[in-house]
Image (cartoon, rainbow, N blue to C red):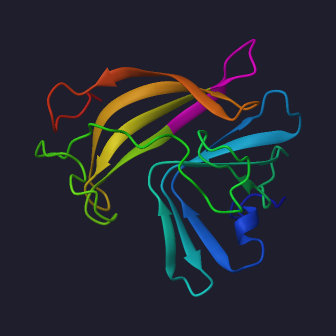
Amino acid sequence: MAPPGHWVISDLEADGDRTIVRDCGFSEPVPGSPGESLWVFCDTIVHDAGRAHVATVPGSSAARGPRHPGRVPTDLRELPTPAAASSSTGGAPQIFLPQPTGVRRSDGAPCRPDGGAIGDAYPASWTTGMARIPGTARLLITYIDVCVEGRWDFVVSRMGVVEYLPSGHALRNATTLFEAGAPGDEIPE
């Protein structure tokens, strides 16, 4: 743990061979695991020691680690995709919320229709918040499904919520709250 002003660091970065750059970050105490927090991030990019691109996790990734209010974690453990059988990723970030289907570009065309590499357009589910569901051992995660068309250009196609069960590392009951009316439209602000 480090004082505020320090980067949030996972075990993958501890030896200095990798650096992780992440968009947004939300943390919440893990129900049933005193002293631990779940961290959920948006787009995650991994670089090697020379700052060369190693991997990109489009959408969201997640990690768990010690919870010390007022301190920054420096030893998070990256979590695998919830559908994965293993509880360890070997340190590499993986997609947490599933990539959305059916999202569209601003011109109405399918997002990433050719299945090509990230760089043009890609679908992503970005976390927008997280809280414990009162009286349960579950967390409620809010998210938006987007088509990322460029560095700062994206189309927000829908907003939803999903439950996360830390004890089983599972997502369930995904519910869309708002959805764009026509292909390429965005949900109202």
In the picture provided, is 86 more to the left or to the right than 25?
Answer: right
Residue 153, by quadrant, is bottom left
Q: Is residue 3 left or right of residue 92?
A: right
Magenta highlight on residue 136:
yes
Q: Residue furthest left?
A: 107
Measured from the top left, where is residue 64 in percent x and y? 74, 47
State yes or no: residue 168 in magenta: no
Q: Residue furthest top?
A: 135
- The residue shown at (58%, 88%) is 50
Task: Identify which residue is drawn at 68% across, 56% down.
Answer: 89
Residue appearing at x 78%, y 55% in the figure: 73
Q: Position of residue 70 (x, y in %)?
A: 80, 48
Q: Quadrant of the image for the N terminus? A: bottom right
**123 above or below 5?**
above
Q: Image quadrant of residue 134?
A: top right
Residue in the foreground of this view, choosing between 132 and 118:
118
Above or below for 152 versus 81? below
Residue drawn 45% across the image and 49% down it = 59
Tell me: 48 left or right of 122.
right
Up-down: is 177 above or below 157? above
User: How many marks do you count on the picture?
Assistant: 0
The quadrant the C terminus occupies is top left
Q: Residue furthest bottom?
A: 50
Quarter-of-image position of residue 137: top right
Q: Position of residue 74 (x, y in %)?
A: 78, 61
Q: Which residues are magenta?
A: 128-139
